[in-house]
Image (spheres, helix red, strand yellow):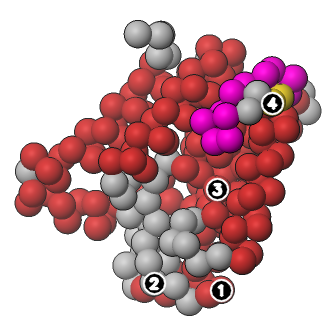
Amino acid sequence: MPFIPPVTKAFMLICVGLFCLPIVVPSLAMLNFQMALWPLNTGRFEPWQPLTYAFLHGDAWHLFFNMLGLWMFGSELEALWGGKRYAQLLVASALTAAAAQLVFTLLIGSGAPTVGASGALFGLLLSYGLMFPDRIIMPLFPPIPMKAKVFVAIFGAIELVLGITGSSGIAHFAHLGGMLGAWLMVNYWRGGRRR
Protein backbone atom coordinates (compact mmCIF):
# COMPACT_ATOMS: atom_id res chain seq x y z
CA MET A 1 0.00 0.00 0.00
CA PRO A 2 1.51 3.38 -0.98
CA PHE A 3 2.32 5.77 1.84
CA ILE A 4 -0.53 8.02 2.97
CA PRO A 5 0.65 11.06 4.98
CA PRO A 6 -0.99 11.70 8.38
CA VAL A 7 -3.39 14.57 7.57
CA THR A 8 -4.60 12.86 4.39
CA LYS A 9 -5.02 9.60 6.30
CA ALA A 10 -6.93 11.29 9.14
CA PHE A 11 -9.27 13.06 6.69
CA MET A 12 -9.92 9.78 4.86
CA LEU A 13 -10.54 7.86 8.09
CA ILE A 14 -12.97 10.49 9.41
CA CYS A 15 -14.90 10.50 6.12
CA VAL A 16 -15.12 6.70 5.99
CA GLY A 17 -15.98 6.52 9.69
CA LEU A 18 -18.79 9.06 9.42
CA PHE A 19 -20.12 7.28 6.33
CA CYS A 20 -20.21 3.92 8.15
CA LEU A 21 -21.41 5.21 11.53
CA PRO A 22 -25.14 5.53 10.67
CA ILE A 23 -25.03 2.09 9.05
CA VAL A 24 -23.62 0.50 12.20
CA VAL A 25 -25.61 2.69 14.61
CA PRO A 26 -28.81 3.81 12.79
CA SER A 27 -29.85 6.07 15.64
CA LEU A 28 -26.89 8.34 14.76
CA ALA A 29 -28.24 9.08 11.27
CA MET A 30 -29.50 12.41 12.64
CA LEU A 31 -25.85 13.42 13.03
CA ASN A 32 -25.53 13.64 9.23
CA PHE A 33 -28.60 15.87 9.12
CA GLN A 34 -26.98 18.28 11.58
CA MET A 35 -23.54 18.22 9.93
CA ALA A 36 -24.67 18.76 6.32
CA LEU A 37 -24.42 22.26 4.83
CA TRP A 38 -27.99 23.57 4.79
CA PRO A 39 -28.89 26.63 2.70
CA LEU A 40 -29.34 29.87 4.60
CA ASN A 41 -33.01 30.15 3.64
CA THR A 42 -34.00 26.82 5.25
CA GLY A 43 -33.58 27.82 8.89
CA ARG A 44 -31.43 24.69 9.38
CA PHE A 45 -28.06 26.36 8.81
CA GLU A 46 -25.64 26.16 11.76
CA PRO A 47 -22.20 27.82 12.08
CA TRP A 48 -20.26 24.53 12.15
CA GLN A 49 -21.71 23.25 8.87
CA PRO A 50 -19.25 25.07 6.52
CA LEU A 51 -16.63 22.64 7.85
CA THR A 52 -18.53 19.51 8.88
CA TYR A 53 -20.28 19.00 5.53
CA ALA A 54 -16.92 18.13 3.95
CA PHE A 55 -16.67 14.94 6.01
CA LEU A 56 -20.03 13.55 4.83
CA HIS A 57 -20.85 11.74 1.58
CA GLY A 58 -24.10 10.90 -0.16
CA ASP A 59 -23.28 7.35 -1.25
CA ALA A 60 -20.43 4.86 -1.53
CA TRP A 61 -19.36 6.02 -5.01
CA HIS A 62 -19.24 9.65 -3.88
CA LEU A 63 -17.05 8.60 -0.95
CA PHE A 64 -14.84 6.33 -3.08
CA PHE A 65 -14.03 8.88 -5.77
CA ASN A 66 -13.42 11.69 -3.27
CA MET A 67 -11.09 9.48 -1.22
CA LEU A 68 -9.29 8.31 -4.37
CA GLY A 69 -8.71 11.92 -5.44
CA LEU A 70 -7.66 12.91 -1.94
CA TRP A 71 -5.08 10.11 -1.92
CA MET A 72 -3.88 10.77 -5.50
CA PHE A 73 -3.41 14.52 -5.23
CA GLY A 74 -3.36 15.20 -1.49
CA SER A 75 -0.63 12.76 -0.52
CA GLU A 76 1.97 14.43 -2.72
CA LEU A 77 0.91 17.94 -1.72
CA GLU A 78 1.08 17.04 1.97
CA ALA A 79 4.57 15.57 1.45
CA LEU A 80 5.59 18.79 -0.30
CA TRP A 81 4.07 21.32 2.12
CA GLY A 82 3.93 19.46 5.41
CA GLY A 83 0.85 18.70 7.47
CA LYS A 84 0.14 22.19 8.81
CA ARG A 85 0.17 24.02 5.49
CA TYR A 86 -1.68 21.17 3.78
CA ALA A 87 -4.41 21.25 6.45
CA GLN A 88 -4.71 25.01 5.99
CA LEU A 89 -5.28 24.50 2.27
CA LEU A 90 -7.94 21.84 2.90
CA VAL A 91 -9.79 24.10 5.34
CA ALA A 92 -9.55 27.13 3.02
CA SER A 93 -10.88 25.09 0.09
CA ALA A 94 -13.72 23.59 2.12
CA LEU A 95 -14.75 27.01 3.50
CA THR A 96 -14.71 28.82 0.15
CA ALA A 97 -16.59 25.89 -1.40
CA ALA A 98 -19.21 26.23 1.34
CA ALA A 99 -19.42 30.00 0.85
CA ALA A 100 -19.90 29.61 -2.92
CA GLN A 101 -22.57 26.97 -2.40
CA LEU A 102 -24.41 29.07 0.21
CA VAL A 103 -24.51 32.05 -2.16
CA PHE A 104 -25.63 29.87 -5.07
CA THR A 105 -28.41 28.12 -3.12
CA LEU A 106 -29.60 31.48 -1.78
CA LEU A 107 -29.76 32.93 -5.31
CA ILE A 108 -31.71 30.00 -6.77
CA GLY A 109 -33.84 29.40 -3.67
CA SER A 110 -32.72 25.81 -3.18
CA GLY A 111 -33.45 24.03 0.09
CA ALA A 112 -31.25 20.97 -0.52
CA PRO A 113 -28.27 20.34 1.76
CA THR A 114 -24.72 19.86 0.48
CA VAL A 115 -22.32 17.12 1.58
CA GLY A 116 -18.91 15.90 0.47
CA ALA A 117 -15.23 16.64 0.31
CA SER A 118 -15.45 17.55 -3.38
CA GLY A 119 -14.87 21.28 -2.80
CA ALA A 120 -11.70 20.53 -0.83
CA LEU A 121 -10.72 17.96 -3.47
CA PHE A 122 -11.10 20.49 -6.28
CA GLY A 123 -8.89 22.81 -4.23
CA LEU A 124 -6.27 20.05 -4.10
CA LEU A 125 -6.66 19.49 -7.82
CA LEU A 126 -6.02 23.16 -8.58
CA SER A 127 -3.07 23.21 -6.16
CA TYR A 128 -1.60 20.15 -7.85
CA GLY A 129 -1.88 21.88 -11.21
CA LEU A 130 -0.17 24.98 -9.81
CA MET A 131 2.64 23.07 -8.12
CA PHE A 132 3.24 20.44 -10.82
CA PRO A 133 1.87 22.06 -14.00
CA ASP A 134 3.85 19.97 -16.49
CA ARG A 135 3.47 16.64 -14.70
CA ILE A 136 1.80 14.10 -16.99
CA ILE A 137 -1.20 12.42 -15.38
CA MET A 138 -3.61 9.77 -16.63
CA PRO A 139 -7.12 10.64 -15.43
CA LEU A 140 -9.81 7.98 -15.17
CA PHE A 141 -12.14 10.11 -17.29
CA PRO A 142 -11.03 10.55 -20.04
CA PRO A 143 -8.15 8.01 -19.98
CA ILE A 144 -5.86 10.26 -22.02
CA PRO A 145 -2.42 11.33 -20.74
CA MET A 146 -2.26 15.09 -20.24
CA LYS A 147 -0.38 17.74 -18.31
CA ALA A 148 -1.77 18.53 -14.88
CA LYS A 149 -2.41 22.17 -15.83
CA VAL A 150 -4.49 21.06 -18.83
CA PHE A 151 -6.43 18.58 -16.70
CA VAL A 152 -7.21 21.30 -14.14
CA ALA A 153 -8.28 23.78 -16.82
CA ILE A 154 -10.59 21.20 -18.45
CA PHE A 155 -12.20 20.22 -15.16
CA GLY A 156 -12.63 23.86 -14.11
CA ALA A 157 -14.28 24.70 -17.44
CA ILE A 158 -16.56 21.66 -17.22
CA GLU A 159 -17.65 22.63 -13.70
CA LEU A 160 -18.41 26.19 -14.81
CA VAL A 161 -20.45 25.06 -17.83
CA LEU A 162 -22.34 22.42 -15.83
CA GLY A 163 -22.97 24.88 -13.01
CA ILE A 164 -24.46 27.46 -15.37
CA THR A 165 -26.46 25.10 -17.56
CA GLY A 166 -27.41 22.13 -15.41
CA SER A 167 -29.51 21.15 -12.46
CA SER A 168 -27.94 17.76 -11.82
CA GLY A 169 -27.96 17.92 -8.04
CA ILE A 170 -24.16 18.23 -8.03
CA ALA A 171 -22.67 21.26 -6.27
CA HIS A 172 -20.64 22.57 -9.23
CA PHE A 173 -20.24 26.03 -7.72
CA ALA A 174 -18.93 24.47 -4.51
CA HIS A 175 -16.26 22.78 -6.63
CA LEU A 176 -15.37 26.10 -8.21
CA GLY A 177 -15.38 27.73 -4.77
CA GLY A 178 -12.90 25.12 -3.54
CA MET A 179 -10.64 25.90 -6.48
CA LEU A 180 -10.87 29.61 -5.68
CA GLY A 181 -9.90 29.03 -2.04
CA ALA A 182 -6.87 26.99 -3.05
CA TRP A 183 -5.83 29.58 -5.63
CA LEU A 184 -6.06 32.36 -3.02
CA MET A 185 -4.11 30.33 -0.46
CA VAL A 186 -1.31 29.28 -2.83
CA ASN A 187 -0.95 32.84 -4.14
CA TYR A 188 -0.84 34.14 -0.56
CA TRP A 189 2.00 31.72 0.20
CA ARG A 190 3.82 32.60 -3.01
CA GLY A 191 3.61 36.27 -2.08
CA GLY A 192 6.22 35.74 0.63
CA ARG A 193 3.88 36.05 3.62
CA ARG A 194 4.82 32.66 5.09
CA ARG A 195 4.22 31.53 8.65
Q: Does the CB distance between marks 3 and 4 fall below 8 Å?
A: no
Which label sits in the foreground, 3 or 4? 4
User: Nearest the camera: 29 or 132?
Assistant: 132
**Kind of residue at badge 3:** His
Question: Which residue is disc 2 drawn over?
Answer: 111
Q: Is residue 54 magenta?
A: no
Q: Earlier in the sequence, mark 4 or mark 2?
A: 2
**What x and y, as percent, mark residue 16?**
31, 38
Question: Which residue is disc 1 drawn over?
Answer: 107
Q: Is the residue 34 above or below the residue 60 in the image?
A: below
Magenta segment's dominant SS is: loop
Name the quarter where the N terminus is drawn.
Answer: top left
Categorize mark 3 by other alpha carbons within 10 Å: few (<14), some (14-19), many (20+): many
Residue at the limit of the structure toward the right, as seen here: 191
What is the distance, in whole Å, between disc 1 and disc 3 at their CAs? 17 Å
Residue at the limit of the structure toward the front, as seen here: 143
**Kind of residue at badge 4:** Met
Which label sits in the foreground, 4 or 1? 4
Q: Residue at x 14, y 50 (%)?
A: 23
What is the distance, in whole Å, between disc 3 and disc 4 at their CAs? 21 Å
**What x and y, as percent, mark residue 109?**
56, 89
Q: Residue at x 80, y 57 (%)?
A: 157
Question: Which residue is disc 3 drawn over?
Answer: 175
What is the distance, in whole Å, between disc 4 and disc 1 at their CAs? 36 Å
Q: Is residue 137 magenta?
A: yes
Residue range in magenta is 133-143
Question: Which residue is disc 4 drawn over?
Answer: 146
Categorize mark 2 by other alpha carbons within 10 Å: few (<14), some (14-19), many (20+): some
What is the distance, in whole Å, between disc 1 and disc 2 at their CAs? 11 Å
Q: Is the residue 29 above or below the residue 155 in the image?
A: below
